[in-house]
Image (cartoon, grey):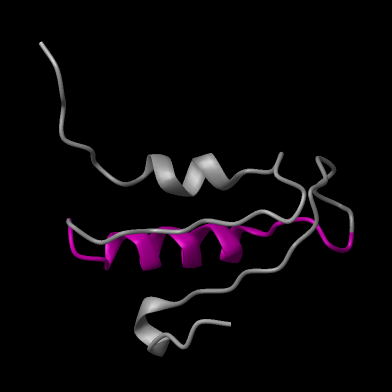
Amino acid sequence: MIELPADRHLELLFGDVTDPDEADAAKLSHIEQAFAFVDGLPQDAHVLIHCLRGIGRSDGADARRPRPLYGT
C-alpha cells in the first residue's frame, strides 16, 4: 500500500446495497466524511476513488470536485 499522510487519505467501508436498513449500508456520516475530505483538498489535487466492485457510488464523491471546462 502507498504510504500517505493521514490528511491525504480517507478510507470508508460500506456495502454496495440500496436498502438503507442493511447493516453495512452507507450512512449519512459516510457521505459527510467523504464530502468534508474532498472539500478540504487543494483544487489541483489528484484523487483516486476506489470501489471494490467497480459499480458503486464512487462517481458521487468525485462529482463534488469542480472541474475546469475544456474545449470550445
- Seen as rendered, the residue at the extreme top is 72
Magenta region includes residue 41: yes
Spot occupied by residue 20 in the image (x, y as percentages of width and height): 80, 48
Q: Residue at x 50, y 74 (%)?
A: 10
Spot occupied by residue 29 in the image (x, y as percentages of width and height): 58, 66
Left or right, 44 with respect to 48, comes to: left
The quadrant of the image that shows the C terminus is top left
Magenta region includes residue 25: yes
- Seen as rendered, the residue at the extreme left is 72
Left or right, 12 with respect to 35, comes to: right
In this rendering, the answer to whether 9 lies above or below 22 is below
Q: Residue at x 16, y 27 (%)?
A: 69
Q: Residue at x 58, y 73 (%)?
A: 11
In this rendering, the answer to whether 71 lies above or below 62 is above
The quadrant of the image that shows the N terminus is bottom right
Provide the residue span drawn in magenta: 23-43
In this rendering, the answer to whether 30 lies above or below 53 is below
